[in-house]
């Protein structure tokens, strides 16, 4: 299943949604024709084979792979707002696979593979820019962690190595690599296949392709309750129960499979089914500057300073920080963040001191104790989770969709996501992914 | 910027404190089953609502205390007032 390219499947199918191409753009521009809707808006029906809660990259990718890889098309994706309005549209669009644990590396590498072929698979310009990814080390401990990560990566054939200040300066001249910097750069983990991608296009591409195969996308449809029978809880919910459907703001739906892909809101949805998750919700703040000429050729990350920087194709610098230090569902910004971020950026790149921040935003992160997701089956039959994505959800979108779809279609946990099962917590087999963003070194 | 009402030091910037997390009662280690213990260690309510949580005033009185905060509005319910012996406890 996993090896067959989606493209060949699509060509075998014969038809796709209208092809986007330069010629099409020119023709439509000259003829002043309207573009067809990228996905349909249809009334909500009262029964589906599967309901996916959350119309972000995870939910839509799951729906897409269910349809394409497994032929399950009677699926509804419901979102309380518009698609891509949560983490999928708020992340800093960085993709990479240089994680620390072998489980993590294998998983994210498959995701990177899917991202690589996404533009042709989904026929949408995702603007994937494989520009290289540098994780800076400012002390001996961090250099040691970088070496550890590089060796784990090399064993799994990931292009990843530790480089010194001279090479870093050659790659990214704007970095202050002198030894008298406030946080001297002692080395970096260099990961050439890492890069950035246009995150909205990823969401829209999955939505358009899933819709083409018959998946229904219902925006502005809030899930109010999950209908469970036979559970051990007082209201018949909880472990041992079986999902019968969901109650939404547009009516009840009956479905044997309900998938929770709601990131920051995961605990709230899971509690509707009587399930407790090892998750706390924290906002992660990000910011973008005014556009300038291209000067930053790679993605630069510093785990110790909790910043990551990349320059978009429009020339803006996109900054991300660490998650806020306390649980919060509020995505308002805070002055500490802007101040700390600006200070750390200037410590790394003194040359950008005259640049102005254009805007700031935050997204909700569903953090787990071991910086690894919670995927697959739960103690409630038919209720699956693809949550706990914290600060690393976007880069895992495609592979999560692929493996969750396999999980639903085959009723078995695929090997790739077996380490991320919810029962690792009662069993005490945590993954401990210290290669995740927002983990300080 | 979150201003946390420390019961001993008064209102302080949240960067002066450490957030410990949700307050749960600790099961008795002598009698708790591994499941109960791990439930206590890892599982969280994570409500978008009022939450009882533990803070540690690391740059001030260096004491642990429990406060009740709304995770949507960041408002503290019945914030304690230092020196107020009768005090309203969270």
Image (tube, coloured by chain):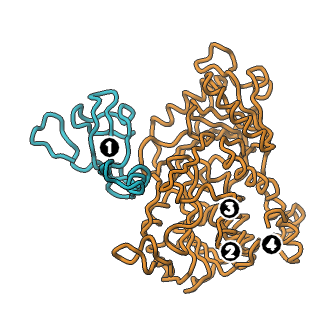
Chain colours: A orange, B cyan
Along the polypeptide, which appears first: circle 2 or circle 4?
Answer: 4
From the image, tell me which residue sits under label 3.
A203
Residue A79 horizontal/vertical position (percent): 55, 69
Closer mark to the observer between disc 3 and disc 1: 1
Tags 4 and 3 in contact by the CB under 8 Å rule? no
Disc number for residue B54: 1
The residue carrying pointer 1 sits among few (fewer than 14), some (14 to 19) or many (20 or more) residues within 10 Å by Cα, namely some
Decide if residue B38 is in sight here.
yes
Closer mark to the observer between disc 2 and disc 3: 2
Q: Chain of mark 4?
A: A
From the image, tell me which residue sits under label 4.
A33
Q: Same chain for marks 1 and 4?
A: no
Q: Chain of mark 2?
A: A
The residue carrying pointer 2 sits among few (fewer than 14), some (14 to 19) or many (20 or more) residues within 10 Å by Cα, namely some
Q: Same chain for marks 3 and 1?
A: no
Q: Same chain for marks 2 and 3?
A: yes
Q: CA distance from mark 1 to mark 4?
A: 60 Å
Residue A356 horizontal/vertical position (percent): 59, 34
The residue lying at 82 percent from left, 74 percent from top is A16
Question: In the drawing, does residue A403 fall left or right of residue A441?
Answer: right
Q: CA distance from mark 2 to mark 1?
A: 43 Å
Q: Same chain for marks 2 and 4?
A: yes
**Quadrant in the rendering for residue A322:** top right
Tags 1 and 4 in contact by the CB under 8 Å rule? no
Along the polypeptide, which appears first: circle 2 or circle 3?
Answer: 3
The residue lying at 63 percent from left, 19 percent from top is A184
Q: CA distance from mark 2 to mark 4?
A: 40 Å
Closer mark to the observer between disc 1 and disc 4: 1
From the image, tell me which residue sits under label 2.
A409
The residue lying at 33 percent from left, 40 percent from top is B55
């Amino acid at each position: 299943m996993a090896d067959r390219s989606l493209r060949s499947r699509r060509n075998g199918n014969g038809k796709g949604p209208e092809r986007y191409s330069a010629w099409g753009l020119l023709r439509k521009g000259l003829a002043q024709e309207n573009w067809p809707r990228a996905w349909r808006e249809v009334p909500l029906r009262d029964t589906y084979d599967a309901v996916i809660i959350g119309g972000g990259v995870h939910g839509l990718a799951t729906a897409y792979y269910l349809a394409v890889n497994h032929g399950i098309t009677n699926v509804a994706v419901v979102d309380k707002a518009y698609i891509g309005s949560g983490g999928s549209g708020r992340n800093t669009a960085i993709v990479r696979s240089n994680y620390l644990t072998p489980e993590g590396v294998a998983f994210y590498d498959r995701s990177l593979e899917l991202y690589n072929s996404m533009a042709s698979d989904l026929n949408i310009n995702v603007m994937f820019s494989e520009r290289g990814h540098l994780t800076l080390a400012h002390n001996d401990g961090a250099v040691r962690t970088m070496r550890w990560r590089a060796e784990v990566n090399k064993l799994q054939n990931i292009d990843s190595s530790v480089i010194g200040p001279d090479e870093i300066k050659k790659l990214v001249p704007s970095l202050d690599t002198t030894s008298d910097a406030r946080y001297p750069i002692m080395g970096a983990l260099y990961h050439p296949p890492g890069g950035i991608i246009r995150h909205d296009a990823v969401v829209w591409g999955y939505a358009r392709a899933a819709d083409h195969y018959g998946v229904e996308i219902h925006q502005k449809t809030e899930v109010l309750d999950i209908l469970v029978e036979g559970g051990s809880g007082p209201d018949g919910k909880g472990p041992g129960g079986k999902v019968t459907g969901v109650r939404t703001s547009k009516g009840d739906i009956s479905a044997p499979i309900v998938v929770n892909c709601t990131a920051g809101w995961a605990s709230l949805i899971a509690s509707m089914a009587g399930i407790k998750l090892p998750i706390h919700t924290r906002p992660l703040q990000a910011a973008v500057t005014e556009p300038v000429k291209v000067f930053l050729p790679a993605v630069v990350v510093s785990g110790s300073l909790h910043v990551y920087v990349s320059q978009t194709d429009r020339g803006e610098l996109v900054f991300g920080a660490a998650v806020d230090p306390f649980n919060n569902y509020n995505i308002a910004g805070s002055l500490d963040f802007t101040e700390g971020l600006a200070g750390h950026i200037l410590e790394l790149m003194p040359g950008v001191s005259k640049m102005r921040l254009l805007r700031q935003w935050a997204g909700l992160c569903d953090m787990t104790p071991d910086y690894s997701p919670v995927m697959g089956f739960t103690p409630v039959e038919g209720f699956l989770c693809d949550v706990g994505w914290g600060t690393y959800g976007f880069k895992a979108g495609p592979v999560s969709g692929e493996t969750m779809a396999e999980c639903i279609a085959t009723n078995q946990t695929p090997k790739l996501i077996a380490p991320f099962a919810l029962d690792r917590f009662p069993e005490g087999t945590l993954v401990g992914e210290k290669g995740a963003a927002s983990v300080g070194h | 910027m979150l201003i946390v009402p420390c019961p001993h030091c008064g209102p302080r910037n949240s960067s002066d404190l450490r957030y410990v997390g949700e307050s749960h009662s600790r099961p008795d280690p002598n009698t708790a089953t591994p499941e109960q213990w791990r439930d206590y260690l890892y599982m969280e309510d994570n409500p978008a609502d009022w939450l009882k949580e533990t803070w540690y005033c690391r740059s001030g009185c260096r004491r642990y205390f429990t406060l009740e905060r709304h995770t949507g509005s960041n408002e503290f319910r019945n914030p304690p007032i230092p020196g107020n012996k009768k005090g309203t406890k969270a």
